[in-house]
Amino acid sequence: MRIFITGVTGMAGSHLAEYLLQGEGLEVYGTFRWRSRMDNLDKLKEDGRLNIIASDLEPTLPNRINSSKLNLMEADITDPFSMKRVVAMVRPDRIFHLAAQSYVPVSWIAPAETLHTNIVGTVNLLEAVRAAGIDPIIHIAGSSEEYGYVLPNELPVTESNPLRPLSPYGVSKVAQEMLAYQYFRSYGLKTIVSRGFNHEGPRRGEVFVTSSLAKQIAEIEKGLKDAVLYTGDLSSKRDWSDVRDFVKAYWLVVEKGTPGEVYNIGSGVAREVREMLDMLLGMTDASIEVKLDPARLRPSDAKVLICDATKFRKFTGWQPQIPFEKTLKDLLDYWRERV
Ligand code: NDP
């Protein structure tokens, strides 16, 4: 079976590739760009499990694909030609569409780029599938940010909750999901959407709140910065899971999900950012002052997001296994090794 992952160099994509490569009989392919951060794939590289295919030179796949390796192909989802080329070459049976401009605050600074990458990028992928004449199951990574403004009596949110996105990123994910639905209805493409709540762990981009706080603590421990930790709003509540649990859920989406459907994925437990920070501070001996940085506040923010994943759990039995303390400890250790 051939698996194709867009955004394999990202946090979720790299963990998903490692998870899939533990299995037997899967050929795993993924996209990267010339400017991609490749360090998330360091573990696979060290193990000799990366194979770069020159997709601009070869019209078809080389005869001998090593199924124990991640096969990387250069492509940009905003470019219809590169998407058509790589999808036609791989002819995947399963697609995980993870590539995105994934950072909410950047979507206020660069809304057009966010909408273009996330929406047009999805069209390019779906059109590439149509052009190749293949019939894969396609997972589209939607987000809890699609719910945005949630009323207290709507918590925890189910899939039928109104979508009231509060950022261009949230809007882009709603549009992605609508495209998945439209291509399912219009052309019978087997798209399945997950609305993922926050997932974290090693390799989380340093701009995201968990990673930013963990990295600052690691820098303070090494004396690389003053013992002041800058934060944004600490009162928001988020439903956090571990990315290594999440990629298992993504696999269950394509194995057991129904095309045309949408599934919430999350733990069902919400914690304030302040609680998460206290947990991180409890993992260090450094004495640290916490200061609000107004530049880190958002124009509008989903105050509380809690997931009701009953629909997904019912037919998959998925439950997060990794305690949040371990997720944060592994993230802090990840930064301790890097700063
Ligand atoms: P990351 O930001 O870590 O990874 C994003 C990936 O997308 C990177 O590999 C990036 O590559 C790639 N990418 C961005 N733009 C393009 C482009 N134009 N062409 C090709 N590739 C591109 O995100 P995550 O791994 O955390 O998230 C994966 C998906 O899940 C995203 O769609 C995100 O929106 C969604 N999601 C994530 C949640 C979370 O809590 N992590 C929650 C809900 C949804 P490059 O290095 O080249 O930029």
Image (cartoon, grey):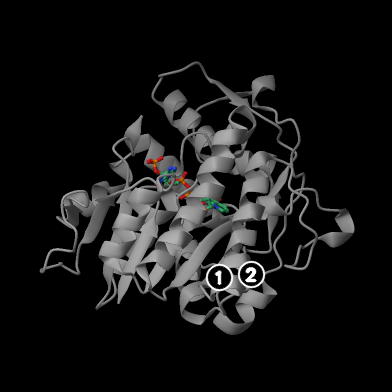
Tell which circle, 1 or 2, labels the residue nearer the N-terminal end. 1
Q: Is residue 112 left or right of residue 7?
A: right
Q: Which residue position is annotated with label 2? A: 262
Residue at the location (54% across, 73% down)? 187
Task: Evaluate whether residue 319 shows in this view.
Answer: no
The residue drawn where x is 37% and y is 59% is 5
Image-based side of 74 in relation to 257, left or right: left
Out of 92 and 223, give the one closest to the viewer.
92
Tag 2: amino acid: Val
The local secondary structure at tag 2 comes to strand
Residue annotated with mark 1: 192
User: In which quarter of the view is residue 70 placed?
Assistant: bottom left
Image: 314 above or below 236: below
Q: In the image, is residue 294 above or below residue 252?
A: above
Q: State which quarter of the image contains the N terminus.
A: bottom left
Residue 123 position within the rendered picture, expressed as x and y whole percent measured from the top left: 51, 55
Question: Which quadrant of the rendered structure holds the C terminus?
Answer: top left
Residue at the extreme right of the image, as rendered: 153
The alpha-carbon separation of the residues under discs 1 and 2 comes to 6 Å
Measuring from the top left, give residue 244's x and y in whole percent: 44, 60
Mark 1 crowdedness (10 Å alpha carbons): few <14, some 14-19, many ≥20: many
Q: Residue at x 67, y 50 (%)?
A: 145
Please tell me which residue is depicted at 23% across the width and 58% down the height of the picture: 71
Q: Is residue 101 above or below residue 151?
A: above
Name the element at disc 1.
strand
- The residue type indicated by label 1 comes to Ile
